[in-house]
Amino acid sequence: MPGLLQTPEYAQVELAAGVSRGNISTEQAAERLSFRLARQAAITRQPAPMIHVVMDESALRWQVGGPAVMVPQLRRVEELAGLPNMIIQVAPFSLGARRPFHHSLTLLALPNRMQIGYVEDMKQGHLERDIPTVREWSRDCARLQADAPSVADSMATVRAVRKELEQ
């Protein structure tokens, strides 16, 4: 689940797992939680940025914290998808090898129309300014957005998974 969309409870469970595995300290988890939640303020600031998220279907089905955490998390995704500045799509498992990314990728459009990319894995993040690399990532993102179901169909998937968990 992308950090920008996470409920505090989801983020806490995810970060606590990192602590229990010994990947991060309790202090690092608290710092990351605070940063993640503070970053979410960007969603509703004025003027609100346009945010387009294409998340993997596994983000809906991976039961972080079980139904007690996932049901409110999926409701949050549905609520955010209703905001005028948010586009949320779910890339289904059926995309298979057409899915171009295996890690989180963020593309930022700067006021001067330049784009930069940010990728992260389990250990670190990397800011990419190399124009050919960012251009390639941008093309791959455009293909992914086109291949992913519409927002309406994506939210139908989110609702269906949520209803499964509510039973």
Image (tube, rainbow, N blue to C red):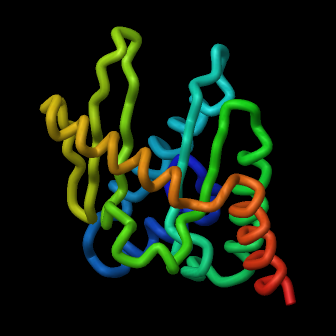
Quadrant in the rendering for residue 100: bottom left
Q: Which residue corresponds to the image point at 78% horizontal and 61% vertical from the top-left?
A: 75
- The x and y percentages for residue 144 are 45, 55
Q: Position of residue 72 (x, y in %)?
A: 76, 65
User: Is 116 placed above or below 136 here?
Assistant: above
> Is 147 situated left or right of 25 in this image?
right
Q: Nearer the viewer, residue 29 or 123?
A: 123
Q: Residue at x 58, y 29 (%)?
A: 50
Say which quarter of the image contains residue 43. top right
The front one of 40 and 163 is 163
Q: Please, which residue is most extreme toward the bottom here?
A: 167
Is 26 located above or below residue 97 in the figure? above
Task: Tell me, yes or no, if residue 94 can be seen here.
Answer: yes
Residue 138 spot, x, y in % from top left: 33, 40
Horizontal side of 132 relative to 1 (left or right) equals left
**Residue drawn where x is 86% and y is 90% of the image:** 167
Q: Residue furthest top?
A: 112
The residue shown at (26%, 71%) is 23
Q: Position of residue 96 (x, y in %)?
A: 41, 78
Indicate left or right for 34 with 88 as reference: left
Q: In the image, is residue 14 above or below residue 2? A: below
